Amino acid sequence: TAKTFANHFACGGSVSKNPQGLDEIVVQGDFSDEILGLIHKNHPEVPRDNIELTEEKKPKKVAP
């Protein structure tokens, strides 16, 4: 699925472990709405409650 996302959205996608030790798919870019649609289209067996979208914002660098 991570590879499907990466190919479909032409972005970076990978599977990594989260702090709880569970696998999660990480996609670079802002595709959250489109990803939900793609998951439900390709994997209708996945309950909506099992999908969590998180947005990581890196702190901006402050010029000295």
Image (tube, rainbow, N blue to C red):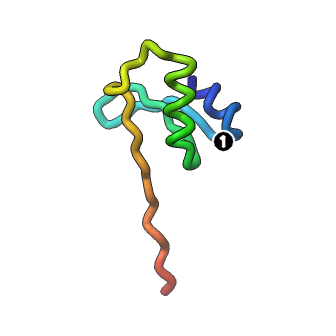
Q: What is the total number of numbered labels drawn onto the structure image?
A: 1
User: Few, some or many C-alpha atoms within 10 Å of disc 1 (few <14, some 14-19, many ≥20)?
Assistant: some
Instruction: Name the residue located 31 percent from the left edge and 37 percent from the top edge.
Output: 19
* Residue drawn at 57 percent across, 23 percent down: 1
> In this rendering, would 53 be left or right of 7?
left
Q: Quadrant of residue 41?
A: top right
Q: State the image coordinates of residue 22 (x, y, percent, origin top left).
A: 35, 26
Residue at the left extreme of this rendering: 20
Write down the residue under mark 1.
11
The front one of 8 and 18 is 8
**Please, is residue 32 above or below residue 25 in the view?**
below
Decide which of 28, 63 is in the foreground and name it: 28
Q: Is residue 24 above or below residue 47?
A: below
Q: Nearer the viewer, residue 35 or 3?
A: 35
What residue is drawn where x is 51% and y is 83%?
63
Q: Amino acid at mark 1?
A: Cys
Q: Residue visible at 50% across and 42% down? A: 32
